[in-house]
């Protein structure tokens, strides 16, 4: 039986989950069909907020503290709303790490734990929370970035384990919107074309929107989630500008307003 | 194992392909993961941050897979892939959003080698390979992993950035 299971697993692995492309050769060009069928995996295809913030650090010296937001409520009852806010808080954690603000990191860490507890996934995350607190205490900023990403992955893993897989998309979405809000906010006030080009993220939001549409009906029909999609479409249009045509300062302000408006909806108690 | 049972398993696997992720990592995937983390150490020592996510799979001989990633202008990236089997030969290439092959910095070693080889433009396929890239444009890019050996290759793909 064990042999049979191993063979089954081997065959499953060999057949894979995705459409494999043409036989090997170093192709100079991939076809549109191949690009369309490319594998898209959340924890590989969607960058972490840290990657966006790292890129922004190359084109300016952001005052990260100016991108803080007031503490958000942590007593939500809707699981989709909690998941969206968990993602946003993790993005806040990255911002606090960039600001090298240990107290802010600890405050955000506590809020993350509170929300995770509400979802019943705090046990694994609590261990991370203690580690985050220790690293913040010791100003280990580089390690903290890794811990935040590991925390996000553990939150998602815990959601998978308790059959809340659909919520993982919402964690990614909440983090992406909050990261975009913070970065566009800084760029709107410190406009340069190279910085504005960073906001070009058409495939990320396309992937997140497609994941939203594929959510189970119960989650998709949640009033908050349902209201997000058309507004995300507007944001998608704004961050899908052509490569050689960066948004103007006014465009960036619109992106920021749009992202801030989404965050406002996500954080408002219903 | 009877041929009938094998055929039934194969049919079941085709039908249940997307369920693969439900299984725990296989021994080969764990070994490939371990192998790639050895290589990733070279990048983290150079200030690169390792993304805490990976893509694993198995490629039949002569097959390839394409994975979408999203990169930010100004950052530098290393994409690295490994299979634990030193007889396997993987190549890694990066493409822009319209499917054009991009020039990347190569870095290829044999996993069982104790001496790191310098970047070799001709070393396009070994059991551990990496491609370095610093995009001028933010947006989607595509990583293509190809198996040019005569054996199936279970691989692990990671990336790091700074």
Image (cartoon, helix red, strand yellow):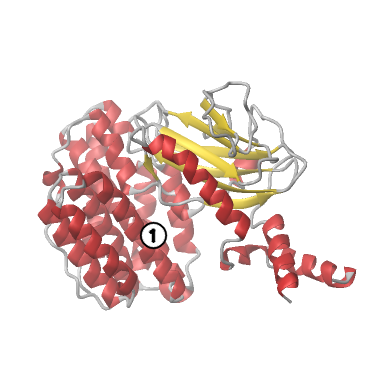
Identify the residue at image location x=36%, y=35%.
B45
Identify the residue at image location x=44%, y=56%.
A209
| Image coords of residue A94 (percent x, y) | 24, 49
Q: In the visual, does A40 lie left or right of B59?
A: left
Q: Single out the residue that lies furthest toward the top.
A: B121
Residue bearing the label numbered 1: A153
Whether B80 is drawn above or below B16: the answer is above
Nearer to us in this view, A239 or B131: B131
| Image coords of residue B99 (percent x, y) | 58, 33
| Image coords of residue B158 (percent x, y) | 49, 45
Q: Is residue A25 visible?
A: yes
Identify the residue at image location x=64%, y=54%.
A18
Chain letter for mark 1: A
Identify the residue at image location x=22%, y=33%.
A249
| Image coords of residue A131 (percent x, y) | 24, 60
- Graded by Cα atoms within 10 Å as few (under 14), some (14 to 19) or many (20 or more), the crowding at tag 1 reads some
Quarter of the figure with the C terminus of chain B:
top left
| Quarter holding residue B83 | top right
- Element on which disc 1 rests: helix
- Picture mark count: 1
Q: In the visual, does A129 lie left or right of B22?
A: left
Nearer to us in this view, A119 or A182: A119
Q: In the visual, does A52 lie left or right of A168?
A: left
| Quarter holding residue B123 | top right
Quarter of the figure with the N terminus of chain B:
bottom right
Q: Single out the residue that lies furthest toward the front.
A: B114
Nearer to us in this view, B13 or A168: B13
Q: Is residue A247 visible?
A: no
Q: Single out the residue that lies furthest toward the right.
A: B3
């Amino acid at each position: 039986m064990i042999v049979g299971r191993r063979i089954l697993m081997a065959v499953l692995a060999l057949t894979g989950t995705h459409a494999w492309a043409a036989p090997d050769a170093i192709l100079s060009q991939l076809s549109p069909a191949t690009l369309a069928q490319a594998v898209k995996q959340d924890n590989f295809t969607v960058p972490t907020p840290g990657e966006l913030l790292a890129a922004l650090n190359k084109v300016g010296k952001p005052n990260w503290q100016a991108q803080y937001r007031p503490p958000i409520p942590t007593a939500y009852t809707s699981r989709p709303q909690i998941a969206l806010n968990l993602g946003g808080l993790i993005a806040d954690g990255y911002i606090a790490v960039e600001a090298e603000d240990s107290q802010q990191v600890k405050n955000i860490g506590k809020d993350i734990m509170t929300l995770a507890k509400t979802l019943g996934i705090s046990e694994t995350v609590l261990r991370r929370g203690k580690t985050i607190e220790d690293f913040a205490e010791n100003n280990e900023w580089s390690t903290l970035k890794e811990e935040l990403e590991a925390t996000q992955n553990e939150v998602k893993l815990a959601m998978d384990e308790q059959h809340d897989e659909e919520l993982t998309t919402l964690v990614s979405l909440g983090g992406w919107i909050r990261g975009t809000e913070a970065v566009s906010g800084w760029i709107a006030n410190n406009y340069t074309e190279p910085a504005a080009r960073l906001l070009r993220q058409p495939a990320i939001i396309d992937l997140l929107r497609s994941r939203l549409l594929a959510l189970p009906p119960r989650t998709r029909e949640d009033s908050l989630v349902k209201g997000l999609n058309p507004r995300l479409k507007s944001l998608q249009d704004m961050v899908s500008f052509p490569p050689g045509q960066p948004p103007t300062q006014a465009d960036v302000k619109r992106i920021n307003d749009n992202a801030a408006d989404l965050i406002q909806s996500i954080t408002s108690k219903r | 194992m009877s041929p009938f049972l094998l055929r039934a398993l194969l049919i079941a696997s085709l039908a249940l392909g997307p369920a693969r992720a439900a299984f725990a990592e296989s021994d080969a995937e764990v070994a490939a993961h371990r192998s790639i983390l050895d290589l990733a150490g070279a990048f983290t020592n150079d200030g690169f941050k390792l993304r805490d996510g990976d893509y694993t799979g198995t490629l039949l001989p002569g097959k390839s897979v394409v994975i979408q990633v999203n990169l930010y202008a100004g950052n530098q990236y290393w994409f690295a892939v490994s299979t634990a089997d030193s007889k396997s030969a993987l190549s890694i290439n990066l493409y822009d959003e319209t499917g054009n092959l991009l020039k990347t910095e190569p870095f290829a070693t044999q996993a069982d080698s104790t001496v790191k080889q310098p970047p070799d433009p001709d070393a396009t396929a070994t059991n551990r390979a990496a491609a370095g890239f610093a995009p001028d444009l933010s947006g989607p890019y595509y990583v293509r992993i190809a198996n040019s050996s005569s054996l199936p290759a279970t691989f692990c793909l990671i990336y790091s950035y700074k």
